[in-house]
Image (cartoon, helix red, strand yellow):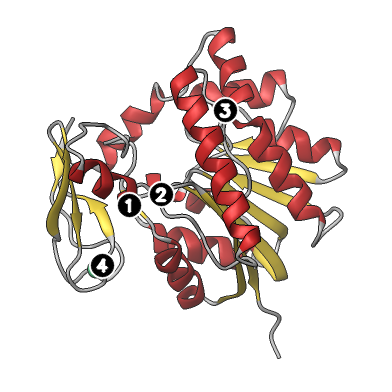
């Protein structure tokens, strides 16, 4: 894989200071804005090739994938319903298209963007969905076009997260809603390092960055989004029993803490969902 050294993807002010290593990959922290990112990271071309084979092909793996993520999609669909009953929805990095299929069933007009050929093929031919081969910027959707844009486990894969958020903002109608689901791994990495436990939790080089809730909300607000609201939003059910048990335990624990604390405590280290709105112009 061809790698390149980059400046901080958020503030461009530093190449970052070493934070954690996984094999030959290194996560760094920007001393200026505290953003955690992979540096050096794969070049654009390397990333493109990497995603050509990122999703599994066998029917059984696709089924496990669906089982793993289903409850998160279900929760997200119910959360969305609190704000919008239906409308036009775009899911970026839609994978096989399972979330779109769920939303279509619920009466939404749906569209997806996906760069993995296996995902595109499955979404189009098996689930009969409209999938653009991406990336999002190339789809050139009109301004103010969607009522909702969603991105599940996408932002941590992107070399230019701010450009992505700006594009989401542009294609959303005023009052439209953005839902992002993202992992937050650094607190667990810090803990495991203290305990001397080796792990590959960052999932490098697939993940190019690791957003904290504060960091992601700051980026959304900078781009123009408002009324940002964090939620735990359920947990995934990985096929591996150990991972599944951990996911259920920490997912449930974080959910209980969140509600007991009256929506104040967001347990560090677990995946989270954030809602944000494109504010109507005064
Ligand atoms: Zn920075």
Whether disc 2's CB lies below 8 Å from ligand 1 is answered: no
What's the mark number on residue 168? none
Whether disc 3's CB lies below 8 Å from ligand 1 is answered: no
Where is mark 4, residue-wise? 34
Where is mark 3, residue-wise? 237
Q: Give the mark, 1 or 4, whose residue is nearer the N terminus.
A: 4
| Residue located 28% across and 63% down the image | 35
Q: How far apart, in angstroms, are the residues tagged by discs 3 and 1?
A: 21 Å
Along the line of sight, the residue nearer the viewer: 194 or 141 = 194
What's the mark number on residue 187? 1
- Closest to the camera, between mark 1 and mark 4, is 1
Q: Is residue 103 left or right of residue 116?
A: right
Name the residue furthest bottom: 282
Q: How far apart, in angstroms, are the residues tagged by discs 1 and 4?
A: 13 Å
Ligand 1's image quarter is bottom left
- Image: 135 above or below 66: below
Whether disc 4's CB lies below 8 Å from ligand 1 is answered: yes
Q: Secondary structure at mark 1?
A: helix
Q: Give the mark, 2 or 4, whose residue is nearer the N terminus.
A: 4
Q: How many marks?
A: 4
Q: Secondary structure at mark 4?
A: loop
Q: Residues within 10 Å of mark 4 (few under 14, many from 20)?
A: some
Q: Position of residue 175 (x, y in %)?
A: 73, 72
Q: Is residue 119 left or right of residue 211?
A: right
Q: Position of residue 264 (x, y in %)?
A: 56, 68
Q: What is the quadrant of the C terminus in the image?
A: bottom right
Tag 1–tag 2 contact (CB < 8 Å)? yes
Q: Secondary structure at mark 2?
A: loop
Q: Secondary structure at mark 3?
A: loop
Tag 2–tag 4 contact (CB < 8 Å)? no
């Amino acid at each position: 894989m061809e790698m390149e050294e980059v400046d901080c993807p958020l503030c461009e002010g530093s190449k970052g200071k070493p934070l954690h290593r996984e094999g030959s990959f290194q996560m760094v922290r920007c001393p200026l804005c505290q953003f955690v990112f992979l540096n050096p990271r794969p070049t654009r071309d390397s990333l493109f090739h990497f995603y050509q084979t990122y999703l599994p092909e066998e029917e059984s793996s696709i089924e496990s994938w669906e089982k793993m993520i289903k409850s998160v999609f279900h929760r997200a669909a119910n959360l969305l319903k609190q704000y919008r009953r239906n409308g036009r929805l775009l899911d970026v990095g839609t994978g096989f298209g399972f979330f779109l299929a769920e939303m279509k069933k619920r009466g939404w007009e749906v569209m997806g963007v996906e760069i993995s050929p296996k995902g595109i093929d499955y979404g189009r031919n098996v689930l009969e969905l409209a999938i653009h081969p991406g990336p999002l910027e190339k789809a050139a959707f009109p301004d103010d076009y969607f009522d909702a844009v969603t991105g599940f486990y996408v932002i941590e894969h992107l070399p230019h997260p701010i450009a992505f958020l700006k594009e989401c903002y542009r294609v959303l109608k005023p009052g439209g809603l953005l839902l992002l689901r993202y992992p937050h791994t650094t607190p667990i990495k810090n803990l495991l390092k203290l305990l001397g436990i080796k792990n590959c939790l960052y999932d490098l080089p697939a993940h190019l960055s690791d957003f904290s809730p504060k960091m992601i909300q700051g980026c959304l607000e900078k781009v123009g989004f408002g009324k940002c609201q964090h939620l735990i939003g359920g947990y995934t059910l990985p096929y591996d029993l150990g991972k599944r048990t951990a996911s259920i335990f920490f997912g449930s624990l974080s959910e209980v803490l969140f509600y007991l604390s009256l929506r104040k405590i967001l347990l560090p280290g677990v995946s989270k969902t954030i809602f944000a709105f494109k504010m109507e112009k005064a």
